[in-house]
Amino acid sequence: MFERPHSRKVKIAEGTVEVKKGEKIEGGPAGGGSDAPLRGNEKDAGEDEEKKD
Amino acid sequence: MRILKRIIRPALIAAAMCALLCQGVQARGVDTNYTQVNGEVAKGARKKYTKLRGKGKDSVTMMVYMLGTDLESQSGMATADLNEMLYAGLDNRNVNVVVQTGGCRRWRNSVISAGKTQRWSISGKGIGLLEEKKTKASMTDEDELSDFIRYCAKKAPADRYILVFWDHGGGSVSGYGYDETHPNDSMNLGEIARGLKDGGVKFDFVGFDCCLMGTLETAIAVEPYADYMIASEETEPGTGWYYTNWLKLLNENSSTNTLNLGRQICDDFTAKNAMYASSTGTTLSVVDLAELGGTVEGKLGAFGSDLTSQLKGNNYQQVATARNGSREFSPSARLDQVDLVDFCTNLNTKESKSLASAIKSAVKYNRVNGISNAYGLSIYFPNSSLKSVNSMIQICEDIGVDSGWTDGIRTYATLEQSGQIVANQGYSYGSGSGSLLDILLGSGSSGSGSYNYTTGSGASGGGGSFLGSLFQDASSGSYSTSSDTGSLLETLFGGSAASTQSQSSGSSLLEALFGGSGSSSQSYNTYDSYGSMSEQDIYNMLMQAYSQGSGSGYSNAYSNAGSYGSSSSSLLDLLTGGYASTSGSYYGVNDYSSIYGNSGYDTSSGSDLLSLAAQMLFGRAIVGSQTLELTEKNGRKVLELDEDMWDQITDVELNVFVDDGEGYIDLGLDNVMQYDEETGDLIDEWNGTWLTVEDRPVALYPISDEDQDGNGLYITTKFTPVLINGERMNLVIEFNEETGEDTVLGAQDVTPTGVQGKGYRELEEGDIIQPVCDYFGYDGTFMSAYELGDPFIVPEDGQLTVVNKKVTGRERMLFTARLTDYYQASYWLPMTEWTPESE
């Protein structure tokens, strides 16, 4: 038995859904999947201060 | 009697509380619920400021600093809590309750004005206005807090003072409060301490009816001004504390023991929120600050000093493993607050055990619901994000935290950042590149950065950079790291050597290392590949660069004069101390003594620092693109790593991108990659399905993944960005292997100050939910967030269907796997185009 990072058990249903983008949203990255420092933050990752302008 | 509009039913709550308390609440992992108050006080505790006269003779003034914010304007939660206070039926002339209201655009009652800052008296007769200011003061201003305290102490001098902070909270980093009428600010711990000091009152207890303020740093900030603190390690549900019962206790006997009051507050809070917000785990504890001040703070310094010694002694992995395994609070907010006792227990050193023991003793009562390993106090310890290290160290210095501790977290952050830089995370050499070792050896990936390399057919290597991986693939279908790609010499000295590579920039690693301008005519030794290199080889390479640099005009090896990518810092600066930000500024510019203290590393020459760099490079599981090359076994592409390498990998996630003909839709990250049962290899395959909510594909990002019982069954939480009725929020989804249920827990606010919205906002029938995604151009630049597909409407029962389905895109779909190590550095496997055959 190998110790590996956990993979969740996936439930799969029948059917297919299409991935398509709609209207543009203002306000910066929503998830930042490619850039960890951006994830979950609506502010620029380069900003040092978290809360103050 | 003036009763506010929104009324909840205390009798109903009391009955439900009784039922819940009798049943008990099941927690995962170590159940840290106290069954009784610990009334003993450890040796070394200071004397309490408040000395009760007893027998109900004590006069009490309770101050409630109530920032209504969106909790009130949207949900009337402040009004509900004021009603709970009113229902206590206060008629004891010795008990005064004074509330300051403000910070809210709209009060959901007919009494309180949103246009003014107002002070109220609460009693069994109702709510009465004491004073009001026509202007809306910023209630996150510490002067406003101190003014309120002084006002109350003058208006109602007492034997016993209580202060409750009511609003959102953001823990040690962001502090207390979000004022809707004065946004973009909060009251940090240093400001809270100054506000309390200027208020001139010593409190019996200070309570935080807000999220995440149950931290050791908060306790240290408040300790000079109070005997006890009542606060929550975790986020609080919006319903917050239940005020009726404990105010009744106080009303019946104004000399009620503080610990008994605290117990009532914790018990009622736990039961109330188990009833109203069953999907949200809760914590609340009573901490004896008089004891903590005398017993804990010194031990924290010793713990920090020992931590620094361990880190300098090459024990980063042990510390990182202990940190990663500790109970973390609000992980989605990346505040990096972990339970201190749990962390100490995991570290299991003499100093950590001593500190854990002192904390356990100072926490006199602790209630949790649905959260394990939460012992009553958390602490900031950087991990998932390093952007707050500087500000947090500054706050610690402001409130007088022992420097042994700040040295410890500074050292850890430095090593983590250095480790990320080695892997080319958090620092950009050009706009895309491989790891430092890739750069040294001229291999690795680079999309459009200053260090280019050939593309073509051949063995495909992964890169340290997602961009390199994705967009090399996007432009040419494949890319290679051929054996004659740019080498150390080119990179070090910026010249053009005999290779097929080109360098679009004259900047060299030598420049990068020392921040100066390099020469292109240096001699060098070459190494063919890092597979055959020793730590000494790597050190020699770095030292060679250092020596050549010193001999060719680099008179100041630590100069910041050069330009390296978008930062003015040298790579050596960053490698050794640039943990703070990607904006070029960091703590203690060029002053390595501020990073490592006055011992441990020779700051007068680069040799010790280069030794550290060489050690880091040599000790890493993944040091460059060669490590991530896929192999084919039994017809499958797999990633094969040694077991000691796997030990360093903390997360592996599938990352899917959909090319829609104009760019890439990022579907985010899901931990669904599979491993070969016989070999343990990572299988580089995707089954073509992605998570859907109500039949709509959603972008997905990780929050937490826990197996608290160690039984192999995980509770995984992720968030998906959405618009709810036009407002940006995140849906939080739980994948529960204990129950087999996958559930949308609710929505979380995306707040601008770092303070956390209380709990989850429940979805209501008819809510219109529009999934949102990030979108990238073909050159890898982030374009914007976009709506993802069509919206859906929350059904009558509020339950949303969460399941994977096959997805299709207009053009092609690409997938990769992201591996993350214990430095929080991430690596992407080569991007693969999905075809039905690749299932």
Image (tube, coloured by chain):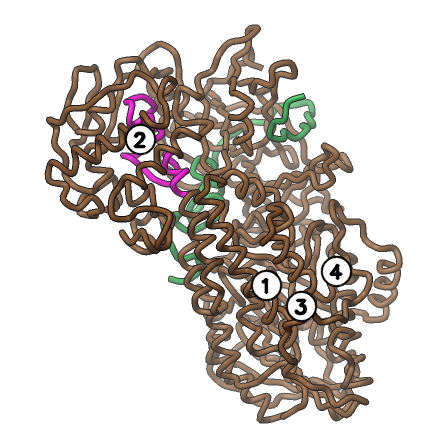
In magenta stretch: residue B439: yes
Kindly identify which residue carries mark 3: B287
| Mark 2 / mark 3, whichever is N-terminal | 3
The amino acid on which the numbered mark 2 sits, given as a three-letter code, is Tyr
Kindly identify which residue carries mark 4: B367
Report the magenta residues as a range.
B417-446
Residue B37: % across, % down: 78, 67
**Do residues under tags 2 and 3 come within 8 Å of each other at their CB atoms?**
no
Same chain for the residues under marks 2 and 3 in the image: yes
Chain where mark 4 sits: B
Q: What colour denotes chain B? A: brown
Q: Which mark is residue B213?
A: 1
Same chain for the residues under marks 1 and 2 in the image: yes
| Mark 1 / mark 2, whichever is N-terminal | 1
Residue depicted at 57% across the width and 36% down the height = B698
Q: How far is mark 4 from mark 2, CA to CA?
A: 52 Å
| Mark 4 / mark 1, whichever is N-terminal | 1
Q: How far is mark 3 from mark 1, CA to CA?
A: 12 Å
The amino acid on which the numbered mark 3 sits, given as a three-letter code, is Val
| Mark 4 / mark 2, whichever is N-terminal | 4
- Marks 3, 4: nearer the viewer: 3
Q: Which mark is residue B609?
A: none
| Mark 3 / mark 1, whichever is N-terminal | 1
Is label 3 in a helix, a strand or a loop?
strand
- Marks 1, 2: nearer the viewer: 2
**Do residues under tags 4 and 1 come within 8 Å of each other at their CB atoms?**
no
Q: How far is mark 3 from mark 4, CA to CA?
A: 12 Å
Q: What colour denotes chain A? A: green
The vertical placement of B655 against B273, above or below, is above
Residue B708: % across, % down: 70, 41
Kindly identify which residue carries mark 2: B539
The vertical placement of B640 against B544, above or below, is above
